[in-house]
Image (tube, rainbow, N blue to C red):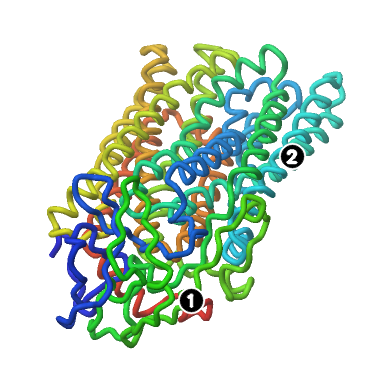
């Protein structure tokens, strides 16, 4: 038992389990006691060598061989674009009264402008999955940005024209409302690649020991950065009109599109499967083979900056013997030349898989029955749903009695949520890699993806404080007994927990099931967006019907605590779960692989 993670009783090596720290000067020892001929590439930039997981190929076009600054630049550009894409979610959070007045719609109809955006994201992610699997991610990032630009211009024009109509032209205003609603759905389609693929790109670009801080940053961008949007949107609404929020996003997305086209090459790479030391396992379950046995590097490659040093071309060209059960290696022949910048800017650079479109399209559906994927959906999706729900309730709190605030002041209340997102980023970014490395050393140098699950502990604490607290604070605010800062502060706690949970679930999925990371993030997006849509549909009705919001939030908080506690069996039995579903592949059983 490795720090509470139960060992598997069938496989000696379970996919996802890797040797993080080891003596790189010696050859790796196979599980049958024999010694492999090859050594592993390591990162020697720190005080002790770290084995690179997965192992990079000898191809200079392999993203794992790119300079670290280049990979970080790609991550930064995609994250900035994701901020503007996901900002479209809460962009109307403080605009309930202006929209209701100018388009003659009730509060529920205004809330559905956000709900249908989320629904568009969830449905589109389902269809973008096979395209990302077959042709990579670059074309989807570019197409998504173009859709965001066009749909935001559309939404702004419809909103402006509807607002300028005389108040008595109710039917015409409803037509403009429907036009804005259609634009919101299309905006969700454009946002989908950034919600589903930016985190998956971290698995393409970085080794296991480099992912923590980067995953925290991308999750801050995807799920946290948007909380600053209502702060600006409220001011913009008052000064020049709420439709200008859409046009500003269109402008910024255009700038981001140029950066994506020029500086973000394809990150998906069809690597030889024997190099994927984190997901490879023998087909023979007797366990007579090590995950680190036959790799392409003849000598240990060292680096001073975190990238792998390329071995000699002769070493890569040598024929290598593999034990039975390892996959074939189609791209271990001659090393291809490095692509030029112009070549790397191609929209497509070849198929990444030979699997059919329709099989890939249906893949996420059976994965909801895999405990690890369901756990990740719950850990990430429910808190995001509660966040959307709380946003709707805060709108009612501050726009109605006793405060009667306008859009500008209501927008400022999201500063608490934005600060919470930053705090969540700091906590997850600090703890994610540190805790993984610390626990790996305590476990004799063997890394288990379940070590990422410990980050649910701060999520549980902060989430419980936020959800239980905001229920009592909201009721007290209704009665004018507390300052508005109290519920805003508790909202910050809840958002911090949301970011930490998103990072924990994303890291666990990428480390344990990297070969299914796109499918996994698609599952998470489908779950959290449909869940959030349902909450926006009923949020205002629940507020109106409930005599007090305290029982409602007590129920929500208790459900969230119960969901976080499922992390205990997931931590203990996660390795056995990985083994079981490696031996009983749910996708093969359903004919989807």
| Residue plotted at (60% across, 38% down) | 85
Q: Position of residue 51 (x, y in %)?
A: 27, 59
Q: Secondary structure at mark 2?
A: helix
| Residue plotted at (67% across, 18% down) | 237
Q: Position of residue 404 (x, y in %)?
A: 56, 12
Q: Position of residue 12 (x, y in %)?
A: 21, 76
Q: How many marks?
A: 2
Q: Quadrant of the N terminus?
A: bottom left
Do we see residue 116 in this rendering?
no
Residue 408 is left or right of residue 282, and the answer is: right
Q: Position of residue 349 (x, y in %)?
A: 63, 62
Q: Which residue is mark 1?
A: 333
Q: Nearer the viewer, residue 278 or 410?
A: 278
Q: Is residue 436 above or below residue 173?
A: below
Label 2 crowding class (10 Å Cα cut-off): few <14, some 14-19, many 20+?
many
Q: Which mark is residue 491?
A: none
Determine the image quadrant of residue 407: top right
Q: Which residue is mark 2?
A: 151
Q: Is residue 291 above or below residue 179?
A: below
Residue 227 is left or right of residue 132, and the answer is: left
Q: Nearer the viewer, residue 34 or 193?
A: 34
Q: Nearer the viewer, residue 423 or 390?
A: 423
Q: Is residue 360 above or below residue 442?
A: below
Determine the image quadrant of residue 480: top left
Do we see residue 55 in this rendering?
yes
Label 1 crowding class (10 Å Cα cut-off): few <14, some 14-19, many 20+?
few
| Residue plotted at (31% across, 65% down) | 16
Judged by depth in the image, the label closer to the viewer, 2 or 1, is: 1
| Mark found first going from the N terminus, 2 or 1 | 2
Instruction: Tell me if label 2 and label 1 are in contact, CB under 8 Å.
Output: no
Q: Secondary structure at mark 1?
A: loop
Marks 2 and 1, how far apart at CA: 46 Å
């Amino acid at each position: 038992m490795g720090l509470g993670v139960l060992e598997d009783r069938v496989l000696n090596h379970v996919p996802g389990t890797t040797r993080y720290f080891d003596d790189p000067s010696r050859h790796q020892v196979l599980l049958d006691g024999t010694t492999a001929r090859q050594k592993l590439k390591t990162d020697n930039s720190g005080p002790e060598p770290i084995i690179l997981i997965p192992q990079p190929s000898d191809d200079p076009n392999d993203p794992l061989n790119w300079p670290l600054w280049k990979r970080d630049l790609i991550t930064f550009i995609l994250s900035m674009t994701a901020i503007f894409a996901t900002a479209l979610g809460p962009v109307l959070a403080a605009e309930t009264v202006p929209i209701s007045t100018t388009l003659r719609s009730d509060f529920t109809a205004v809330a559905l402008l956000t709900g249908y955006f989320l629904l568009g994201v969830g449905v589109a992610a389902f269809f973008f999955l096979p395209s990302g699997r077959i042709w990579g991610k670059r074309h989807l990032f570019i197409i998504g940005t173009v859709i965001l630009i066009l749909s935001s211009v559309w939404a702004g024009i419809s909103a402006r024209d509807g607002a300028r109509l005389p108040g008595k032209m109710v039917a015409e205003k409803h037509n403009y409302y429907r036009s804005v609603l259609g634009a919101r759905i299309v905006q969700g389609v454009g946002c989908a690649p950034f919600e589903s693929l930016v985190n998956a790109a971290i698995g393409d670009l970085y080794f296991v020991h480099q992912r923590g801080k980067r995953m925290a940053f991308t999750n801050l961008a995807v799920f946290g950065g948007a909380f600053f949007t209502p702060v600006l949107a409220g001011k913009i609404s008052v000064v020049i009109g709420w439709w200008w929020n859409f046009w500003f996003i269109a402008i910024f997305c255009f700038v981001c599109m140029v950066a994506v086209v020029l500086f973000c090459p394809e990150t998906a790479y069809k690597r030889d499967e024997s190099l994927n030391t984190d997901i490879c396992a023998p087909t023979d379950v007797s366990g007579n083979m090590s995950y680190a046995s036959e790799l392409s590097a003849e000598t240990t490659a060292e680096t001073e900056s975190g990238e792998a040093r390329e071995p000699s071309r002769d070493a890569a060209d040598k024929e290598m013997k593999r034990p039975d059960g390892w996959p074939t290696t189609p791209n271990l022949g001659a090393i291809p030349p490095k692509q030029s910048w112009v070549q790397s800017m191609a929209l497509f650079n070849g198929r990444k898989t030979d699997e059919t479109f329709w099989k890939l399209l249906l893949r996420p559906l059976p994965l909801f029955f895999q405990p690890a994927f369901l756990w990740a959906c719950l850990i990430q999706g429910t808190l995001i749903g509660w966040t959307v729900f709380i946003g709707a309730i805060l709108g009612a709190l501050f726009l109605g009695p006793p405060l009667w605030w306008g859009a500008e002041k209501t927008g400022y209340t999201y500063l608490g949520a934005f600060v919470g997102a930053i705090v969540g980023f700091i906590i997850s970014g600090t703890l994610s890699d540190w805790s993984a490395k610390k626990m790996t050393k305590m476990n004799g140098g063997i890394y288990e993806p379940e070590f990422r699950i410990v980050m649910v502990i701060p999520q549980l604490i902060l989430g419980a404080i936020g959800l239980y607290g905001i229920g009592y604070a909201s009721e007290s605010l209704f009665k004018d007994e507390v300052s508005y800062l109290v519920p805003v502060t508790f909202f910050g706690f809840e958002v911090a927990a949301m970011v930490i949970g998103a990072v924990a679930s994303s890291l666990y999925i990428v480390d344990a099931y990297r070969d299914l990371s796109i499918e996994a993030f698609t599952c998470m997006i489908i779950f959290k967006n449909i869940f959030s849509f349902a909450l926006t549909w009923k949020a205002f009705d629940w507020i109106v019907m409930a005599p007090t919001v305290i029982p409602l939030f007590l129920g929500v908080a208790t459900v969230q605590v119960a969901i976080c506690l499922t992390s205990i069996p997931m931590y203990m039995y996660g390795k056995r779960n990985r083994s079981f579903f490696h031996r009983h592949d749910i996708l093969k059983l359903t004919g989807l692989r």
